[in-house]
Amino acid sequence: MQSDVIIVGGGSAGCVLAARLSEKPGRRVVLIDAGHSGGGMFARMPAGSYKLLNNPRADWMYGTEPDPSAAGRSFTWPAGRLLGGGSAINGLVYTRGARYDYDDWAANGCPGWSFDEIEPYFRRAEHFVGEQPGGLDVLGTNGPQRLSQFPEPLPVTQAFVEACWQAGLPRKPSYCDGDPEGAFHTIGTIADGERWSTARSYLEPAMDRPNLKVMSDSAVERVLMEDGSAVGVVIRRGGETTELLAPHIVLSAGTLMSPTILMRSGIGPAEHLSSLGIPVLADLPGVGSNLQEHNGSGLRRYVSAQTYNSAIRPIRLAGHFANYLFNRRGPLTSISVHAMAWAKSRPDVPSPDLIYSFLPISFGEGVYPGTPHKRHGVTFALNVAKPSSRGEIRLRDADPHSRPLIDHRLLSVEDLDLLVTGLDKLRHILGRPALAPMLQESIDPEFEQARGDELKTMLRAATGTGYHPVGTCRMGSDSGAVVDPSLRVHGLRGLYVADASIMPRITSGNTNGPTIAIAEKAADLIDATLA
Ligand SMILES: Cc1cc2nc3c(=O)[nH]c(=O)nc-3n(C[C@H](O)[C@H](O)[C@H](O)COP(=O)(O)OP(=O)(O)OC[C@H]3O[C@@H](n4cnc5c(N)ncnc54)[C@H](O)[C@@H]3O)c2cc1C
């Protein structure tokens, strides 16, 4: 089968690209995704993500190598296995990141990617439903990606936001204007009580186009190259292997799989590929390195106020389910994180480097996310916004069916120090008068009381990820970069990468919104070369 462009991976980025690139009726576009279409009721219900995570039908559940920086632990990294990818199973929090994130990219070999240059692509993507925070006009209102604010905030959420203000964080109506320092109620990829993945917002409206073919349950093994030009892909579908041909191939298989597909195709660090017996077509040492994650920790407290701990008890769940079904209201339409605070560890850092996420629920032990505590509890998550830790993705072996080897090296010494500072600041916020009267005893008293080296040891044993891996096909102009600022793989023709993996440095907040904006810009860049 011959087409004009093949997009590999129909996740947050791939769905955007498929929709945008197929706007020209004469262009034949194929979108290939290894995951499933659909996803059922839980893929539409915002709280349904708790049913999708750790469910092998909806979540790839990648295993990582034991991490010496995290007390030798191995992790399971979730990744969306439905059309929409991460946007189909994620926590629904919408952020754009900070002006600094993009200006830093532009200043370091990525001309065209400053905040002012990518902001129009955010706007082009966004469709904010309702009145914007503070009555401002910060977000777009005509794009495909529905966004809204959760209409039913709990008093304890407001108390958290006010406590942050009392601790000195700025009162800012919107955190999407490039200057996110402050505390706010969260915006979500939710509208009318339902999840809006990119499969729903971008792909569904484009599905009827005769020039767009969508193939799910089809895994791309590798890219076919001839004399330095991409000419097609090898896919595996239902146990059979076939070739699809096109002169333009866009990899949007995400931070874990885009570099994996490149390496399987002979594009990557020559020494590594040769050691596995894979013929080297292009020695690009940066493929798979520069892996970044928002490492994180946090505190949990029991509270005297109402939280969602009671909402999801079986006796109440039936009522909330009916409220969701008939009204699209109530806790099952809720975003995971109800409020956030973006703070600076020191006044002289250029942009907030600590991000607090407030969840009006607390979970105990058990399969992720655990069983909710019987008492009302809240979770204050803390993530390092711009971690210095760097990991890498490598091939396990030459078998195209093997999962990649993920060596994430989560916690550098600097990141550990930032977590310690962030926890100090968090304890200060918890002591502010707006929130303190609602707080009861700690759910993790030993951890909350620990200081110094004892705390650092505990952090190494408990720190988790933010579910935001990026950076393994880094954009840049230097010899270690994988793609150039037009997202073309360096030194090759017709091959592009457009997804979260191209971020040279991780954006400060949650990464779905920035990935969508990257894909919007990629669509213009690739459109110009397809002509
Ligand atoms: C559990 C979880 C919670 C998160 N919470 C939030 C949040 O609240 N807010 C936020 O902003 N971000 C969140 N994120 C992060 C965000 O969703 C991701 O950054 C974003 O989805 C990355 O988009 P992507 O296009 O790079 O990759 P993905 O969306 O992962 O897309 C990759 C696609 O490629 C497909 N694929 C993989 N291998 C192949 C292959 N060989 N052949 C063909 N197709 C293939 C996959 O099936 C998938 O559909 C979360 C992520 C997870 C996993």
Image: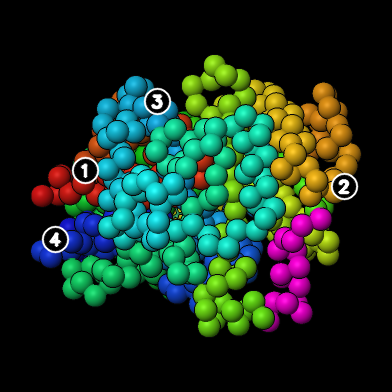
Residue 298 against residue 237 in the figure, above or below: above
- Packing grade of label 1 (10 A; few <14, some 14-19, many >=20) is some
Residue 365 shown in magenta: no
Circle nearer the viewer, 2 or 4: 2
Secondary-structure class at tag 4:
loop
The residue wearing badge 4 is: 24
Q: Amino acid at mark 3?
A: Asp
Mark 4 Cβ and ligand 1 under 8 Å apart: no
Quarter assignment of residue 348 = top right
Across and down, in percent, residue 84 comes to: 42, 62
The residue wearing badge 2 is: 441
The residue wearing badge 3 is: 104
Q: Amino acid at mark 1?
A: Leu
Secondary-structure class at tag 1:
helix
Across and down, in percent, residue 293 comes to: 56, 39
Residue 134 against residue 485 in the figure, above or below: below
Secondary-structure class at tag 3:
helix
Quarter assignment of residue 314 = bottom right
